[in-house]
Amino acid sequence: MRPPSRVREMPILRVVARALVPVILLFGLYVQFHGDFGPGGGFQAGVIFAAGLIIFALTFGVEALRQAVPVVLTERLMAAGVLLYGAVGVLAMFLGGEFLNYSALDPLTTGHHGQHLGIIAIELGVGIAVAATIMRVYYAFVGRRPDGDGETREAALGAGPGEGTP
Amino acid sequence: MIEKIVVLEVVLPLLAAPVCVLVRHPRLCRLLSLGVVAVCLAIAVAVLLEVRGGGVISYQLGGWPPPLGIEYRVSTVNAYLLALVTAMALVVFSFDSRGGPPRVPEPRRHLYYAVFLLCISGLLGIAITGDAFNIFVFLEISSLSSYILVSLGGHRRAVLSAFYYLVMGTIGGVFFMLGVGLLYQVTGTLNLRDIAARLEPSLDDRGTVLALALLVVGVSIKLAVFPLHHWLPNAYSFAPPKVSAFLAATATKVSFYLLAMILFTIFGAPFVFEELRLQAVLLPLSILAMFLASGAAIFQTDLRRLLAYSSVAQIGYMTLGLSTANVTGLAGGLVHLFNHAVMKGGLFLVVACLLYRVGSVHIDALAGIGRRMPLTAAALVIGGLSLIGVPGTVGFVSKWYLVSGVLERGWTAAAVLILLSSLLALVYVGKVVEAVYFRKPAETQPIDHVREAPLGMLAPAWVLAVAAVFFGLTTNWTYGVAREAAELLLAGGI
């Protein structure tokens, strides 16, 4: 889907977006990895990261974003994020603790190092899942025809064979 | 050993769902789901054997001790539910639906399995957890996934009935959430046992009574208690038949457990049934459900709608057992969870067989089908007899204990009404059997091409039909467990 011509002719919008998008993405990563020292965490970081990419799509077209982040990739990342979260919990079980008992992740030190490791890992899972989900929701919305006859244009978005057939 | 892995009941299906999304291969996903459900069933049975006789398994998630941390607490009551849900899930998953629900094209079928696994995980989570907010989260997981599953039915109206189910279910969820919020305000804790202990001095608090009202109404919507049942007939009759079989056999059962747990464990039988006299509401509603829903079932022309209305009536029997608030009656209600799951699950699988071969389950389209599909029709008859409550089937066992429990309370009229309502079941089952065996096929709908359903479909349906007879003759396991669970609930434990 190409952006409406008015947006393409707005140089200010394009220049500002080009400058802002990398900063927004970087800020998303900051919120992600600084979440255990300050305000933030996986959910907020995921939303910020996805929002940066959606701004990119709004200015340069969904097609451009789809080349960078294919629809199938968002679907896989959604699942991978959840799995990462769960895998940390199961790993803790294998190391002799309860499900999601992060202290078991680092049995050698007596401090809270294991808790630290665990929370970073699961928040990364949350961040990936949230960012991917928001982008998938965005793809689903822009793939829908405005006349609303129920047909989706996801097949046109290259989401895979049979994608979106009712 | 078993107390260390009890959490896998929820974790395995929950993590198998994203694995299905990553694998993207329908056959592999089906095998994975079957394997996961089989392991869950094995764990559930081991847990049930472990906790029988008054044992309790407490699991602290993340190593945080309750009441601050989330606690999974399994006693006979929840172990019974876990075994029921996993067993029904295994039977339904082993049903080979030959291409899955019609609206799911091949490239997306892995998502169907992922959603199914999420639904199972949510239901098991509600049954296993001992934390009020955790229950809400799992309630939403199971509800959201069942809306999706219902919407996958072949008919266009499947989407509409899924949306209606979504609206009603969400209202129920909100009511439940408000109730939990009020309880948290009154007691300052979310651990169920802790709530029960701290609620004792503030039972007369207006907030407590309001919380009880909100929780009961919220769960009643999910359970489809009589005037709040309106979402159920449409959802069950337009969902894919395999989904109807699973939801009819498990979703309402878990809601029933939730209602019983709220009334007996959190608020306690003396407060609910002696001070507030909830049975004054619950008993008439149960009897109305038995009669009006059975009456509605008689006038249905579609077998699926008929079975769905019959489900509403059967839920009436369960809540009737609840409102007696004595061991026999409550055990009757609890044993009916299992018994109804077996017969209604079996009947909906029979419907799936008929739909696959005949293409319609309109009663007129089924005329004379007994000759063409003798085994399928025989399973249908066994399930139907069980719905009526003929001795030798599971339906009889439930009604026996329900009537005994009601008589123990001295409600003779209610006992008579239970027996009378069985006559209504006789009418609607008789109507189906008459068409299947004794009516000539209509000339416009020749059935010469119809053959017996394939083995992959017939076997699971027959497993449930045999179970309906087996557990109708041997009640040691089902009623034994249900009675123990009832005693535990009445004593205020879980």
Image (cartoon, coloured by chain):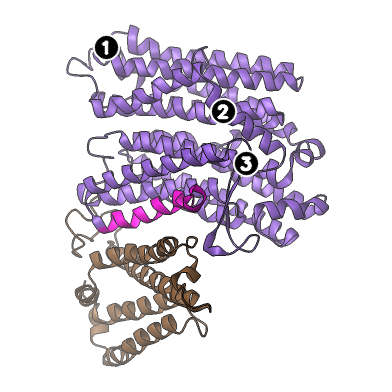
Chain colours: A brown, B purple
Q: Is residue A94 above or below residue A126?
A: above
* Tag 1 residue: B441
Which badge, 3 or 1, comes first in the chain's sequence?
3
| Residue found 59% across the figure and 57% down from its top | B133
Residue A18 can be seen in this image: yes
The amino acid marked with disc number 1 is Pro
| Residue found 56% across the figure and 15% down from its top | B422
Gap in Å between the C-alphas at discs 3 and 2? Answer: 15 Å
Read off the chain for label 1: B
Which badge, 3 or 2, comes first in the chain's sequence?
3
SS of the residue at dot 2? Answer: helix
Let me know if marks 3 and 1 both belong to one chain.
yes
Residue B181 within the segment the image draws in magenta = no
Image x and y of residue A85, in percent? 40, 66
Residue B316 can be seen in this image: no
Q: Quadrant of residue B327?
A: top right
Of tags 3 and 1, the one toward the viewer is 3
Let me know if marks 3 and 2 both belong to one chain.
yes
* Tag 3 residue: B259
Magenta part of the chain: B1-22
Q: Which mark is residue B432?
A: none
Q: Is residue B469 left or right of residue A25?
A: right
Read off the chain for label 3: B
For disc 2, the neighbor class at 10 Å (few under 14, some 14 to 19, many from 20) is many
Residue B9 within the segment the image draws in magenta = yes
- What number of labels is visible? 3
Q: Is residue B417 above or below residue A11?
A: above
Q: Is residue B119 left or right of residue B80?
A: left
Read off the chain for label 2: B
Image x and y of residue B73, in percent? 59, 49
